[in-house]
Amino acid sequence: MASSSSPFLSLLLLIPLFFFFFNSANAKRSSSDGSEEWGYVQVRPKAHMFYWLYKSPNRVDNGSTPWPTVLWLQGGPGSSGVGLGNFVEVGPLDTNLKPRISTWLQKADLLFVDNPVGTGYSFVEDQNAFVKTDEEAAIDLTTLLKALYKSDERLQRSPLFVVAESYGGKYAVTLGLSIVKAIKARELKLKFGGVALGDSWISPEDFVLSWAPLLRDVSRMEIVGAEKANSLAEQIKQQIANGQYEEATAAWSNLENIITKYSNSVDFYNFLLDSDQDPVSTTTLSMTMGTSMNRYARYLSSKADSSNGDIDQLMNGVIKQKLKIIPKNVSWGGQSDLVFSALSHDFMKPRIAEVDQLLSLGVNVTIYNGQVDLICATKGTEAWVQKLKWPGLQNFNKIERKPIACEGVVGTKGFVKSYKNLHFYWVLGAGHFVPVDNPCVALKMLSRITQSPASAS
C-alpha cells in the first residue's frame, strides 16, 4: 500500500524534475527518484505505443524468489490500460490522485500500455497503421517489450506476468505465444511467468450462448425473450463456424439489443443491476460496434466518477501535463473507436487454441472470473475451458475447489483450483472488473500467481 509519502504522489506536482531522452523512433522520461518511467516506442513506421512503468516501493530483492513485473492489458478493444487499469483499477493512485489501498504495487512492479496503437495515448499517423488482428497486436507488444528489456537488467531479472481483462485476454494469449517464440529465438531476454485471463473474451460463441440461460436462471429474463436470444446466439455460433466473423460481430450487437429489451436493461457487467444503476452501461437499443467498447470504457469511468474523479479530464489535463511527452494533437482515447472498427473481423474469433498451445508449452495459465459478470459470464468461461484439448483437463476437472477467505470479513469470498499449469479462480461478489469489485481476492490471487516475495495481504 502506498503511504502518504509515496513517491507516486509526485503525480500531484505539475513541475517535477525529469530526465529526458529522445530520438526519431522513441521518447522516454522518468521521475526524478526513478520510481516511474514512461514513454513511446515506435513499434512500426507511423505507429507509436505508449507505456508507463511503476517500480514498487515494496520491492524485495530475494535471490530465490525474484520480484515480479505485471504487464496489464485492458480490453475494449480500444480501452486504455494507462488510464483505466492504472487509475481506476490497480495502479498506485485513484482518479483523485489519492493512494489506492489495494494497489497491485504491493506485490509487483506494474507496466501499463495503451494497446493496440490508437488506444489511450498511443497513436498512429496513418489509419492504415491500425492493427487488424490479435496477432498483429501481439507483434507490436513484443516489439515494445524488446525495446524495454534490451538493456534493462532489472527488468530482465524480474519474471513477467501478463494479466489481462476482457478483450485483453485475446491479446494476452497471442502475446504469450509471441513471447515464447522471441525468447526461443534469443530476440527477447525475459523470464516469462505466465498469463492471467480475467473475465476474458476468449470464446465469444460460448459467452453469447450463456447469456439467455444465465439470465433465466436468475429471473432476469423469461421464455419469450430467452427464445429470441437463444435463436440469435445459435446463428452467431454458425457464423463463427463458417468464418463469417464480421457478420457475427453485427449479430452480436443485435443480440445485446435483444438482451437489453427483454431484461429491462440489465447491466452487462453486473447482472444483479440495471444499466441505469450504472448509468454508463447499456442505455440505448441502437448500438453499433463502437458503442459497446465505449460502454466498457464509460462503465469504468463511472467507477471513477463515483469518487468525484473524471478520468477523461484527468488524462487530458493534469496527467498529460505531468507526462510532458504526449504530442499536442494527441488526446487520450481519441482514436479508440477506430481501433475497435479495425478489429471487427477478429472480434468474434475464438482464441481457445492459443490457450491450449500455452498449456502444452508449459506456460502457467490462470483464468479468473467475477461471479456476477454477464458479458464474459463464468458459465461461458467454464464452457470454453471444457473445449481445451490439453491432456491435463480430465485431472483438473476431478480436483475439488478450495475456498478463499479475506481476513476480517465474514464468509467465503472465492474459490480456486489448480492442476499443473492451469489455475481457475471463481471470485464471488465481483462483476466484470474483479480488482475493483473484490480487491481482497484479486490481491491474494496476484500473490499466488506471481509468487511475490511480499508478505501476503
Image (cartoon, helix red, strand yellow):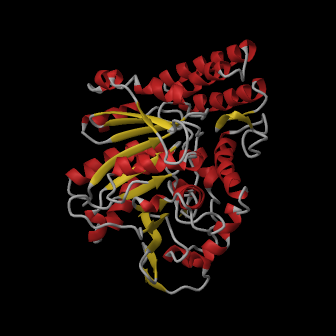
Q: Total marks drawn?
A: 0
Residue 383 or 144: which is nearer the viewer? 383
| Residue 44 seen from this side | no
Quarter in which the C terminus is drawn: bottom left
Image spot of residue 416 (x, y percent): 41, 35
Asked which quadrant contains residue 239, the reply is: top right
Asked which quadrant contains residue 110, the reply is: bottom left
Image spot of residue 354 (x, y percent): 36, 36
Residue 55 higher or lower than 196, as above or below: below
Residue 388 higher or lower than 19, as above or below: above
Asked which quadrant contains residue 222, the reply is: top right
What's the residue at 49%, 26% (across, down)?
243
Left/right placement of residue 317 relative to residue 362 reads right
| Residue 101 seen from this side | yes
Image spot of residue 415 (x, y percent): 45, 34
Image spot of residue 301 (x, y percent): 68, 54
What's the residue at 20%, 53% (across, down)?
185
Residue 292 or 18: which is nearer the viewer? 18
Residue 17 higher or lower than 112, as above or below: below
What's the residue at 27%, 26% (across, down)?
392
Residue 343 or 372: which is nearer the viewer? 372
Left/right placement of residue 293 relative to residue 142 reads right
